[in-house]
Structures are given as C-alpha cells and as structure tokens.
Amino acid sequence: MARLHCTLLQADLIWENKEANLLKLESMIAGIVGAKELVILPEMFNTGFSLRPEVLGETMEGPTVGWMKQMAQQYRIILVGSLMITESGKHYNRLIWMQPDGRYAQYDKRHRFAYAGENEHFTAGDHRLITQANGFKILWQVCYDLRFPVWARQQSSETPEYDVLVYVANWPESRSYAWKSLLIARAIENQCFVIGVNRVGEDGNGIAHSGDSMVVDPLGQVLLQLSNAEAFETVAISKQELEEGRTRFPFWKDADSFTILHSNDLDE
C-alpha cells in the first residue's frame, strides 16, 4: 500500500527578514537527500510570528507565494507553510499547500492567539482544509488550533475523513510539554498520523522556541522527535499501518456525531 515521504523543516527563523529566511529554507530544501514528496515549513516561515501584517503582509501574487511555486516546481515537491496574507483589506495567517504544477489550496488559521494579540491583527478562517497526496487525506491546521480538539475531530462515522493531521507552528519552549502532549492526544483520538512542525531559536520578542517537531502514529507512538536545533528529517508513513490499526481497533466507528456552527450560520 501507499507510503508518503514527509520532510519536517525545523528552522531558526530570522525575525521579520523575508529574504534571509527564504534563502535559508531554500538551502535546507536543496539539502534533502532521498525521496521527498511533502515538505512542511513552520508557521509564518518567512517572518517568524510577527503581529505586523499591515507592514509585512503580502498578496497571493506576492514574492513569497511566488517563491513557494518556484521551489515546488524546481524540486518536484508539495510545499506547505503559513505566512501573512493581506486580502480585501483584511489580514490572514494563511497556510498554503503548493503543488509542483503551481496549483494550490489554502487554509486561514481559525484560532487566533489572543494571549499575544493575534486576534487584533488577523481575521479568523471558518473552513477546514483537507488535501490529498499519494493516497493520503491530510487535514491542515496552524499552531494555536492544536488546543481546540473539536476543530480537528474526525466528523464521519462511515469512514474517517482524513489520514494525517498536520500542525505548523511557532510554539514557545515554555509550553513545550503541552505541544508534545496535545500532538499525541490528537493522534490517539482521531486514529491518524499527526505531524507537528515547529521553529527553533529566539524571536524578536525574546521568546524561545525549542522545536520538538514530531511525527506520531495512530496509536500515539512517537516515530520522530527533533531536538532543540535547526534540522530537517524525512519520515515515510504507511497507509497499510494506518488501515490495519483502524481495522483492529475500530474506535472511530463509535464517535459522537456533531456539526460545527460557523459565525455566519449563527447569524442566520
């Protein structure tokens, strides 16, 4: 059955320096040896977790999205990460799924980190994104979304909605225990692979990040955990392992059915 090679790029992002970050990330991508199908970057990979979208935000026709298109085409990869996008006078922390042929999909971060004031600068998204690669269905989320399990919950009792759940993040070292624990919890409760890609280093606000990028299997076993250093590593996840686990332990069939109401639904 299918396997998907996922490369986690855990970078020490240079504060609000787009050119330097893109050069660094390109060098890391070029250094990936062996199979590379899906390459995952941290949250706000071109700036770090800045709250200045009025200054640093770009359009979908801007240089960073153009860089993603170039990298995906040049290295024949699917490239994913989030950045600040400005659109119709609003700012979004937007995750972009970029394919080698230039086609893309997008997800706007649902849960903005109010503790740091993200909600004062960015508009929340209201729709999830599930993409497909090599026979795997992948649900994409961003950083603070990890604390809200309903937003990630499998929503079908007929067949699981997705096979892999991915979080891109700038998660601080001071709460690394929560990061690691919640990634494992999301894998167990949704019976899926979970991938978390975090940054390392200190940002412009003096906040330290310890990385701890991880790959967790559907039983909650950690297949990979990167240390507190800039690094990239590829893990091949197995569809057969996933299906065998779901068949042996069909807990997903007993899940509660529910519907998420969006703000526009409540207004009606």
Image (spheres, rainbow, N blue to C red):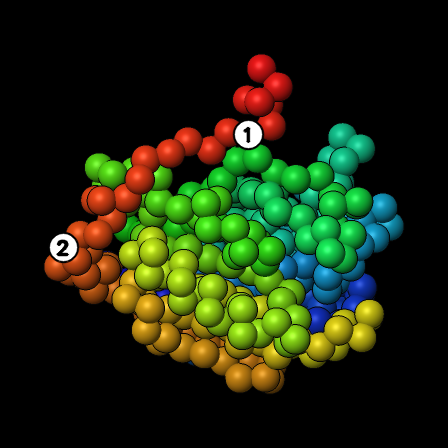
- Which residue appears at 36% of the width and 61% of the height? 187
Residue 14 placement: quadrant: bottom right
- Which residue appears at 64% of the width and 65% of the height? 170
Q: Relative to 131, is 123 on the left or the right?
A: right
Q: Residue 143: give x, y in percent of width and height.
A: 59, 58
Task: Assign a secondary structure to mark 1.
Answer: loop
Q: Nearer the viewer, residue 167 or 102?
A: 167
Compute the Cα span from label 1 to label 2: 33 Å
Which label belongs to residue 247? 2
Q: Is residue 116 visible?
A: yes
204 up-or-down from 91: above or below: below
52 up-or-down from 268: above or below: below
Question: Residue at label 1?
Answer: 262
- Which residue appears at 33% of the width and 53% of the height? 190
Q: Residue 124: give x, y in percent of width and height.
A: 66, 40
Q: Quadrant of the C terminus?
A: top right
Q: Residue 93: give x, y in percent of width and height.
A: 67, 48
Q: Amino acid at mark 1?
A: His
Which callout, 1 or 2, points at the residue further toward the start of the chain?
Answer: 2
Task: Assign a secondary structure to mark 2.
Answer: helix
Residue 173 placement: quadrant: bottom right
As drawn, the residue found furthest toward the left would be: 248
As drawn, the residue found furthest toward the right would be: 55
